[in-house]
Image (cartoon, helix red, strand yellow):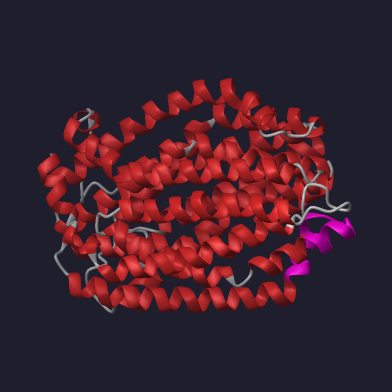
Amino acid sequence: MAKIRDLFTARDLTEGPPWKRIVEFSIPMLIGNVAQQFYNTADSIIVGRYIGDNALAAVGSAAPILNLLLVLFVGISVGAGIMVAQYFGARDRGNLSRTIGNCLTLTAITSMIIMVVGPLVTRPLLELLNTPASIIDWCAGYLNILFLGSLGFSYFNILSGILRGLGDSVSALVFLLISTALNVVLDIVFVASFSMGVPGVALATVLAQALSAVLCLIKLTKMQEHFELNRSMLKLDRGLALTVVKLGLPSGLTQAIFSMAMIMVQSLTNTFGELVIACNVVVMRVDGFAMMPNFSFGSAMTTFAGQNVGAGKMDRVDKGTRHGTLIAAGVSASITIILLFFGEHLMRIFTSTPELVVLSMRMLRILAFGYIAMAVTQSLSGVMRGAGDTITPMWISIITTVVIRVPLAYTLAYLTRSPENPTGRPEAVFVSLLVAWTLGAVITFISYKRGKWRSKALRKSIKEAA
């Protein structure tokens, strides 16, 4: 019983075999990320089965806009996770307490901004994207409900990031599994029983995410042996708040730029018609699961590096980086093999339309080997972020997404125009993504080996800002 209870406590990653600590920390995060992905996947499966392929296309087309307007939370979450990990590793109770309190306040402010701005810009952005008239109303209704209910989403992401920074990746997992189960049940009830359509799917997601946020907050209030959480800690501290923003802004900008690039690519995808739009949704849903190990190991490496940099154990950071990257690449290689042999069965979960299954499988084969490259990118970027260098990963993402991926997608589409494909071949979208992933891994590896991230000792910059 004591060992089980230990799983739900803050965990010190500065002691013990690095590979073992990374794996122990990554597994709950991996399961949690899969559950998080299942939110959107459950939406897609249910709307695809109960409403139709156009509804499936509507839910998928909404994703880039949703991601673009939620980048504020990405920035705060990343900055919070890095600072919490460093202060926890340094055993700095005072700054750890103030950091957590400031993050809770910043989240409330940014949530209010999203709730006001989101519904105002939804339809203009959808029209700018050339969203087909057959699905634009569904897209707009889906997004408006998610934006108005963004408080639960934002607090879950921030609070789970704080818990991970403290080394507790299990509690957030359990809460996410509970809310995921609720999400699926509500999806079925609202769509199949109440016939609420696409808005019912959005409402189910909002309610489930609110539950997960409440559970995370309750857990955090029970961990005050490591920090204090009271009204005085919630008061914004200019130095700490600016440091959170400074650390998180590059990741937030990266996500914003990535989302804008995705919007541009989505605009290209929309010109291929509803079938290709639905294909893109199906492939991206499967891709979301395939990417989960990479994101999990990347986040684990951020916390691992953060705690060990805070403790001054740079040799342990180097050793853990080698272990974590090799493990992540091995897992991604296994996933690639599974996708190549069993991908068609995964496609049939989302749709029973034969031509959509065949098209989706063809596109997935293009992407498959790129997951190994992304394992390298995510692991090494995680280490650099954990050490306090959030700028380098940002520039790498900008180069691979804006400079390489978007122009390449449009160029390939232009070069493959024909009477059968007047706007080009849809493969252009996925080939451009594979090339961007591969070059991203090469650039990230070179940046890591150059070692400039080592000179950006985060605790120094935090102390100066505070």
Q: Which quadrant would residue 250 be assigned to in this image? A: top left
Q: Residue at x 15, y 57 (%)?
A: 90
Residue 194 position within the rendered picture, expressed as x and y whole percent measured from the top left:
79, 32
Residue 439 position within the rendered picture, expressed as x and y whole percent measured from the top left:
49, 65
Q: Is 113 positioned to the left or the right of 338 in the image?
A: left
**Residue 172 vertical placement versus 359 (above, below):** above
Residue 187 position within the rendered picture, expressed as x and y whole percent measured from the top left:
71, 42
**Residue 214 vertical placement versus 433 (above, below):** above
| Number of numbered markers | 0
Report if residue 82 is visible in the image: yes
Q: Is 106 positioned to the left or the right of 141 in the image?
A: left
**Residue 99 vertical placement versus 37 (above, below):** above
Q: Which residues are magenta?
A: 343-359
> Is residue 93 in the magenta section?
no
Q: Which quadrant would residue 156 be assigned to in this image? A: top left
Quadrant of the image containing the N terminus: bottom left
Q: Residue at x 84, y 53 (%)?
A: 418
Residue 114 position within the rendered picture, expressed as x and y whole percent measured from the top left:
48, 27
Q: Which quadrant would residue 252 be assigned to in this image? A: top left
